[in-house]
Image: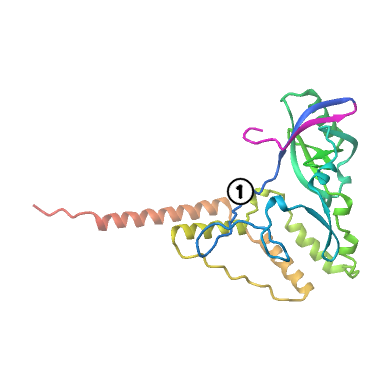
Amino acid sequence: MAGQRAQWKGFVKFGEVSCGVALYTAASTSDRITFNTINTATGNRVNRVFIDSETEEPVPKEAQTKGFEIENGQYIIIDPEEVAATIPESNKTLEIEAFIPCSDVDDVFFDKPYYLTPDRMGSDAYAALRDGMRKSNVAAIARTVLFRRMRTVLIRPHGKGLIATTLNYDYEVRSSKKAFEELPKIKIEGEMLDLAKHIIGTKKGEFDPATFDDRYEAALAELVKAKIEGKALPKKKKVEVSKPNDLLAALRESAGMMKAAADKPKRTAANANAGTGRQRAARGTAAKSSAVKTAPQRKAG
């Protein structure tokens, strides 16, 4: 990928077939507006300093090490070299362990996406893997050492290439049963369910990320621009809070609004053109009248 640096380079292997590949970040936050911490007295940027929790004295980097808390305030010291020794050895190979249906992996396990590209364009092995998975409608589970950790990766066909998504481990994903254990069992039936289905049906659409705007980022940009230009700061819009109401009444009202919008008569092409013509004629008449009033009058000689 032109203009980008690969995050990782190695090989992808399936069976006895392998090909060179590279990983490129698919999602990035580098374009977001960021702020530095500033000393209000001097206007200088503030640097981070590590302070001893007891003596409150600064601790230089060479005096810092790792520690694991075993009791409140009690630590066992672990040397950085001991930590480095635990990093698994890397053979730079994404070893595909299994091909699975694409729907088998719950997206709650998804971590970060990367574009997986061939190290040289036109690789037959890469194309064979991509097209084979696409035709079979499967994804690949692979494992390798990425960024100092052994990672499980989900590989899927994506456009003209492949996308590799690192997966969270089971212990990193919180249980959904615990999240919803206090949720009471409520069954919606009859008119209430029909109205909900009707509203959903009228609001069906397609996923288009280009239509989603980051309002917070836009507001920050507006704030920064106003400060640079010395203008008044943008006023925060008042948030209108919906009034609590009866669910069935709210569903009926929503369904009625949807139906009214759908049943609203549309102007025919003829009527629309006629209206446009009348507007143009009116504008033309007004323009002629204005020209007559402002034209210089010739004096009789």
> In this figure, which colouring scheme has been used for the structure?
rainbow
Q: Is 215 located above or below residue 140 in the figure?
A: below
**Was residue 192 drawn as part of the magenta stretch in this picture?**
no
- Comparing 250 with 154, the one in front is 154
Q: Position of residue 256 (x, y in %)?
A: 72, 67
Please determine whether, in this image, residue 198 is positioned above or below residue 133.
below
Q: Secondary structure at mark 1?
A: loop
The stretch in magenta equals 1-15
* Residue under the point 70% across and 63% down: 258
State the residue position of label 1: 31
Out of 199 and 85, give the one closest to the viewer. 85
**The N terminus lies in which quarter of the figure?**
top right
x, y percent for residue 250:
74, 72
Q: Nearer the viewer, residue 93 or 206?
A: 93
**Does residue 137 sit above or below 261 in this rendering?**
above
**Residue 110: x, y in percent?**
81, 48
- On screen, residue 126 versus residue 98, left or right, reads left
Residue for point 81% across, 32% down: 92
For image coordinates 64% across by 57% down, the residue present is 48
The image quadrant that residue 57 belongs to is bottom right
Q: Quadrant of residue 262?
A: bottom right
Q: Kindly identify the amino acid type of the residue bearing the numbered disc 1.
A: Asp
Residue 44 located left or right of residue 66: left
Q: Residue at x 25, y 57 (%)?
A: 294
Q: Is residue 274 visible?
A: yes
Query: Is residue 5 rendered magenta in the image?
Result: yes
Which quadrant of the structure image shows residue 265? bottom right
Q: Position of residue 124 (x, y in %)?
A: 79, 23
Q: How many marks?
A: 1
Residue 151 seen from this side: no
Label 1: few (<14), some (14–19) or many (≥20) C-alpha neighbours in 10 Å: few
